Amino acid sequence: MTTIAVLPGDGIGTEILDGPLRLLRKLAAGGAPITLTGPYPYGSSGWLETGSTLPAETLRGCREADVILSGAVGTHPRVSPADCPTPEAALIELRHEFDLRVSVRTVRVPGGDDVTIVRNMTGGAYAGATGRRESDGSTAAEDTMVLLPERVREVLEIGARYAADKPGRRYVSVDKASVFATSRLWRRTAGEVSASTGVRFDNVNVDRAAYEFVKYPELPAVVVTEGIFGDILSDVVCARAGSPALCGSATINPDRRFGSGATALFEPSHGSSPHRTGSRRSNPTGAWLALADLLDWCPDLAPLGLAARVREALDATYRAGASTYDLAADAASAVSMDEFNDRVLAALDLAESGLAGTGR
Ligand code: IPM
Ligand code: MN
């Protein structure tokens, strides 16, 4: 049995998971080993309900779950930034709490090849609270950056495994070795992992990588890099793909110890888009891609072979010309989020395969 804690978060987070949740409920009703718990509040909504961006009840729900499915965290129309300045900190706290230390993002480039970005999520620029010192305006602010060799190696080795699945393309390791000691460790380790795995990573400085990802027609298959570089570059790759909504994000604990709390968090990588909340026009592709990653990650669910089918259903939906407002040629031809979800579910054809129950 796989327990999935649902944390919709803020803004469009409250609607963007609707399609994936419809599928999960259908699967559970059809006998798949899935238990959904929540929805648990966090981010600004958590603060509004309980005064905390990561309420105790939410944390408890995540401890009792195998994986977390999240919408988006960010601002909320009824919460002033003065009261709750950094709702996103709840996401960082969750990652630290469950040692979700590696991020794997896959950007679907319509009509092109996917790009996978692997980065460290704890350590490095994403140090916990102990690695930072706030300024009162007159004192120095401090963010320390510490990378352990074994953590760098882990990220590179995970990247090498993705590279092995995408033969014949380019793989890059991004750093700023001309400036940072952490980057020099990164580059040295990239060389060692290239030698031990046979996957050749090109070493590219982060500024040059940004230039190439905008300029070169062909994107690399795999990018391995430090957390903050990967955060920025994954948005650059999304821009190339055409929308921030084309990226599913998984934050994983590579130890994969199922049975002792959340092992991974899955979410679309876009923000909470508060001004679009309730419009039901947003593009749910990232949420579907996050669900596919979740279905691949969980040992009880992977054998159902659903992850590949979700990705195929998305491709089929795009091929049939369905586009939400962000990708549609003109406003008149854009489909709503619900219409897009209906089409993905229809393309999955669950009834045919005997996987669906009678759930909504
Ligand atoms: C993202 C976001 C987060 C990150 C923030 C909100 C902590 O930018 O998911 O890309 O940097 O990981
Ligand atoms: Mn980001």
Image (cartoon, helix red, strand yellow):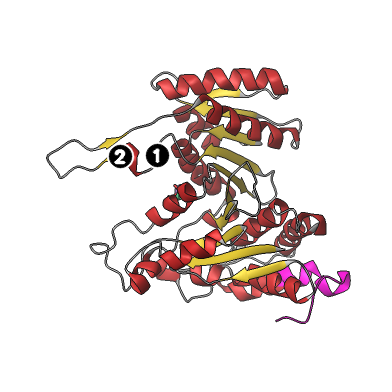
Point out the image quarter for the N terminus: bottom right
Residue 120 coordinates in the image, percent (x, y): 51, 37
Q: What element carries label 2?
A: strand
User: Is residue 253 rendered to the left or right of residue 1?
Assistant: left
Mark drawn on residue 60:
none
Residue shown at the point (75%, 30%) measured from the top left: 168
Report if residue 130 lies within the magenta region: no
**Which residue position holds label 2?**
132
Give coordinates of residue 96: x percent, y percent. Answer: 46, 47
Q: Is mark 1 on a helix, strand or loop?
A: loop
User: x and y percent of residue 152 in the render?
Assistant: 54, 29
Q: What residue type is labelled 2?
A: Arg
**Cβ–Cβ below 8 Å for labels 1 and 2?**
yes
- Specify the quadrant of the image occupied by residue 253: top right
Q: Does the magenta stretch include residue 349?
A: yes
| Residue 243 vs residue 344, the one in the foreground | 344
- Residue depicted at 42% across the width and 18% down the height: 178
- The residue closer to the viewer here, 329 or 133, is 133
Q: Nearer the viewer, residue 358 or 110?
A: 358
Q: Residue 127 carries which label?
A: 1
- Report crowding for label 1: few under 14, some 14 to 19, many 20 or more residues within 10 A (C-alpha): some
- The residue depicted at 70 percent of the width and 54 percent of the height is 298
Quarter of the figure that contains the C terminus: bottom right
